[in-house]
Image (cartoon, rainbow, N blue to C red):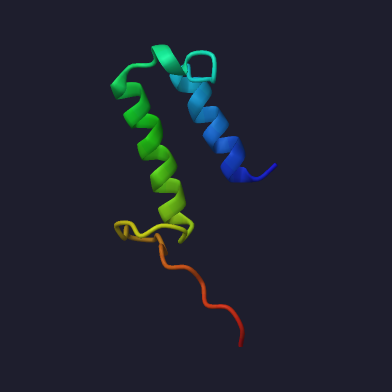
């Protein structure tokens, strides 16, 4: 399991989210989780996101 998978599962548990609770989750809870997902994807260069000090959000070049 990747570190991203573990992190996202941890965040879902912290917020009380699961497939069984999704229908009853508040908009605020879903927004919080979605923001965490998007932030992590941007931090890995998979989505465009805001640059932060010490954060390299651009995908690495492939090849030589």
Residue furthest toward the bottom?
A: 64
Q: Is residue 50 above or below residue 38?
A: below
**Residue at position x 35%, y 22% in the image:** 29
Based on the displayed image, in which of its 4 quarters is residue 5 positioned? top right
Q: Horizontal and vertical percent for residue 55? A: 40, 60
**Residue at position x 61%, y 44% in the image:** 3
Q: Is residue 17 above or below residue 39?
A: above
**Viewer-closest of 52 and 16:** 16
Q: Is residue 59 above or below residue 63?
A: above
**Viewer-closest of 22 and 35:** 22
In the image, is 25 to the left or to the right of 5? left
Residue furthest toward the right?
A: 1
Q: Is residue 35 above or below residue 18?
A: below
**Residue at position x 51%, y 72% in the image:** 60
**Viewer-closest of 63 and 24:** 24
The C terminus lies in quadrant:
bottom right
In the image, is 45 to the left or to the right of 32? right
Q: Horizontal and vertical percent for residue 10? A: 55, 29
Mark count: 0
Q: Horizontal and vertical percent for residue 2? A: 65, 45
Q: Horizontal and vertical percent for residue 42? A: 41, 54
Based on the displayed image, in which of its 4 quarters is residue 31 positioned? top left
In the image, is 52 to the left or to the right of 17? left
The N terminus lies in quadrant:
top right
């Amino acid at each position: 399991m990747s570190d991203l998978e573990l992190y996202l599962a941890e965040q879902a548990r912290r917020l009380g989210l699961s497939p069984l609770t999704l229908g009853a989750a508040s908009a605020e809870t879903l927004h919080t989780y979605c923001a965490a997902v998007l932030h992590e994807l941007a931090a890995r260069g998979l989505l465009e996101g805001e640059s932060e000090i010490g954060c390299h959000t651009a995908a690495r070049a492939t090849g030589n």
